[in-house]
Image (tube, rainbow, N blue to C red):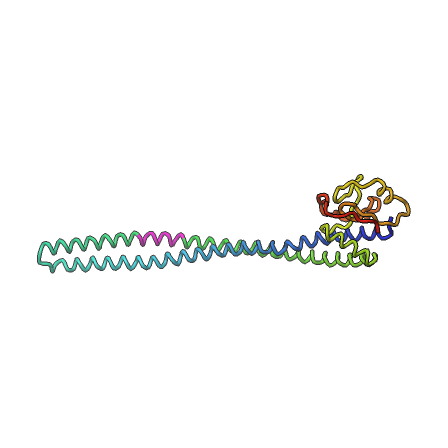
Amino acid sequence: MHPHLKYLIELQAVDFRLIEIRERLSKFPKRLAEVEARVTSAKQQITAAKDALLTAQKERKTYEMDVEQWKERAKKYRNQSGEVKTNEAYKALLHEIQNAEDEAAKAEDRLLERMVSGEEFDRQLKAAEAAVKEVEAQANKERHTIQAEYNAAQKELAAAEAARAAAVASVPEDLVDHYERIAKRHGGVGLAEIRGEGCGQCGVHIRPHMIQLLQRDGNEEFYHCETCTRILYYPDHSVSPAAPPAPSAPDSSAASSPKI
């Protein structure tokens, strides 16, 4: 096989590892955002409960004033009852007294409703405050876990990048460029293992003659898949690379590429 093929296989194994690590790192902001969203939602419940309680308290004061005003009016009319001179005036005054007492009773009913609802809003506020404490406690644990995982992933990334630099150093620059151009077109996969008689990535049938050439002792040529153009290698050349991304559907757009 080509003397640099095993180094390309090692390079691709490192690249697979880098893809996996970067994929994990890309998910950390979303995970943190979900944690913060739960905390925000819980705090919004407190705000809503406080607003409702404040409204109930304002309305309670209004209804308390209404009760006092109607009772005061009824008292005033009763005090005037001894001063009227005619039955008609007396009847009219009694009507006003009854109306004021009826309105006072209605205001007291509204006041009672506001007092009951105020107690419920107060209960909801206390429940929301307790819920926020629980949510924040859980969020702090999750933040700590996410941060620890993020730090570990960053260390993995640094180690993998160092391993890639070492792998690249073993391969001629033009060959690295060639490999990277192919990998860029195929989601980071520049090599393809031959599986059975087909390309392990795009699945296209590999001609027997090319397989024979790849297996031939002393072969120092690169061969490409005629469909996806990835560099082919036979399983015996593997150096236990990391598992590649799932094979894609056959690439119909890539032209065949000659050996280099």
- Side of 57 relative to 81 (left or right): right
- Side of 48 relative to 78 (left or right): right
Tell me what residue is drawn at x 84 percent, y 40 percent: 208
Q: Is residue 118 magenta?
A: yes
Q: Position of residue 249 (x, y in %)?
A: 71, 43
203 w.r.t. 171: above or below: above
Q: Position of residue 149 (x, y in %)?
A: 66, 55
Q: Nearer the viewer, residue 175 or 133?
A: 175
Report how many numbered discs are placed on residues in the image: 0
- Side of 87 relative to 199 (left or right): left
Q: Nearer the viewer, residue 203 or 57?
A: 203
Q: Which residues are magenta?
A: 110-120
Tell me what residue is drawn at x 80 percent, y 49 percent: 257
Q: Position of residue 243 (x, y in %)?
A: 75, 47
Tell me what residue is drawn at x 80 percent, y 56 percent: 176
Q: Quadrant of residue 251?
A: top right
Q: Position of residue 31 (x, y in %)?
A: 60, 54
Tell me what residue is drawn at x 37 percent, y 52 percent: 117
Q: Is residue 129 magenta?
A: no
Q: Main secondary structure of the magenta part?
A: helix
- Side of 27 relative to 218 (left or right): left
Q: Nearer the viewer, residue 132 or 44?
A: 44
Farthest left residue in view:
86
